[in-house]
Image: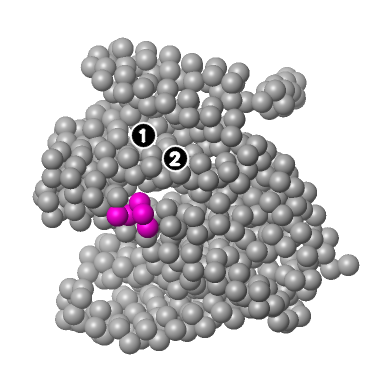
Amino acid sequence: MEKNQTLDPKSLTTGRLLANNVIWNFLGALAPAICALVCLPIMKHSLGMDRLGIITLAFVIVGYFSLFDFGLGRALTKMVAERVGQRSWKEIPALIWASLFLMLIFGLLGAALGFEFSPWYVYRVIKIPPTLQHEALVSFYWLSASLPVVVITAGLRGILEAVQEFRLATIIRIPIGIFTYLGPVLVIPLSHSVASIVAVLVVARLLACIGYFFACFAVLPDMKRVGFASPASVLSLLRFGAWMTVSNAVSPLMLWFDRFVIAAMVSVSAAAYYAIPNEVVIRLTIVPYALLGVLFPAFSTASAHDPERLGVLWQATLRYIFIAQFPIILLLIAFAPQWLHVWLGADFAQNSSLVARWLLAAILINSVATVPYSHLQSIGRPDITAKLQVIELFLYAGVLFVLARRFGINGVAVAWFLRMAFEAIFVFYFSARFLPSTKPAVARLSWMLAATMVAFVIIAATGSMEIRVALAAVICLGGMLIIWFWIFSARERQFLVSSFLRRSSLGS
């Protein structure tokens, strides 16, 4: 029997496997970031700011290339995981090849558009010194040519994630992520040409794509048989992908729109006072997104195989995200003026402390809301999240303009908080409708978040450093007791106690 026919839906949603995969997923995101911290200063010193600017712009463009899969990568992950849950293994190869073929078509279309608009972008849109314009143009031609490879690579990685092969996917992902920053450093002794550096990166991505193909063939040997997916499956792929494309297009607008509003309505310097704390806050989402990257295919598998298990995973994920984020965010809110002063100086401590506190409170709400958001997409309802975000965009824009005009960057931060709260309310509502067993957990979380927001206000309003330290300690201790006795189930408490005793006995 082929390996893909021995995939057991129960084994793909076990706690131990998912926990290990979260660690692998986290490492896959962390390793390139660490490498970037080391390599970017070297690139700046050796290449100069103009060439470094072109390379960093290339990194951004490669990141946005994912839009050209039109949501099919996410759709493929969801549908393969769903077929595994249904034990419909024979449908998987045809589904995969249909998706990859469509992604290739869209990738080639994007490449053609890239070749067509690169000269206009290089010579008219971005300000590049004339001596570097030819290098930049050739670089963008290379990037355009790589678009089909980038899109297909994302689809292949999604296949591995659908069957919880995060370890294998990360083993390929980490080297290519590191080489994205290390590669230019290795090329510098041979050439300072941006075109040469980008060409090397494109070749590396091609090798990564080939590696993902071999990995998929090893995990799913039936992929070697090319088949034809049913029209209904293709339509489901396209429908899911279309709604995902709406979300992928709207989300960046809401993420970056506020900075342009501040620059236009307040000042450019005010935009910096807002944007830098915002960048710090967004980095805190690495934990929930590493977790949900693993849980999305697990949700899809469980929804098709064992809805009761889906409810258990949903509630456990919600608890662990809250537990991971709460103490960090509490401390950052309590001591916002201090860490801003140490990091960026007194001016940022004075102008950005309140902004940082509003954004941090919002990110806690957003972190827990990723669970119902991912659940809705995993059960094939990306239309709900997409429609919600379209409505949200117009409401947010209106509130943003009003509050920015009246309260400056602090008003913008409040608008960001209100947007996160609005989205959380609705995704939790719709998720609970499709999964009624989660309603008690949603009720408990609502009370916890309300109490948490009150605690944030109290600790932020406290002027004395000594009292603030004491309050932070009391709130953390009280929060842990509430989580232990009210949030954790009896089974979880028993498991944690037995694990602790077992480790203690081994240590002694």
Q: Which residue carries the number 1 mark?
A: 361
Residues 471 and 206: in front is 471
Asked if residue 76 is positioned above or below residue 496 in the image, the reply reads: below
Asked if residue 414 is positioned above or below residue 491 in the image, the reply reads: below
Left or right: 98 as drawn, with respect to 357: right
Residue 352: image location, x then y, percent: 21, 37
Residue 56: image location, x then y, percent: 32, 65
Judging from the image, what secondary structure is the residue with disc 2 in?
Answer: helix
Q: Which residue carries the number 2 mark?
A: 425
User: Which residue is pictured at 30% across the width and 35% down the height?
Assistant: 358
Residue 75: image location, x then y, percent: 58, 65
Q: Amino acid at mark 2?
A: Ile
The crowding category of the residue bearing disc 1, from other C-alpha atoms within 10 Å (few below 14, some 14 to 19, many at least 20), is many
The crowding category of the residue bearing disc 2, from other C-alpha atoms within 10 Å (few below 14, some 14 to 19, many at least 20), is some
User: Which residue is pictured at 48% across the width and 64% down the height?
Assistant: 243
Please identify, in this view, whether the residue under mark 1 or under mark 2 is nearer the observer: 2
User: Which residue is pictured at 49% across the width and 20% down the height?
Assistant: 479
Instruction: Say which quadrant the N terminus sits in.
Output: bottom right
Asked if residue 299 is positioned above or below residue 52 in the image, the reply reads: above
Asked if residue 209 is positioned above or below residue 427 in the image, the reply reads: below
- The image's mark for residue 222 is none
Q: Earlier in the sequence, mark 1 or mark 2?
A: 1
Instruction: Say which quadrant the C terminus sits in.
Output: top right
Query: Which residue is farthest front?
Result: 433
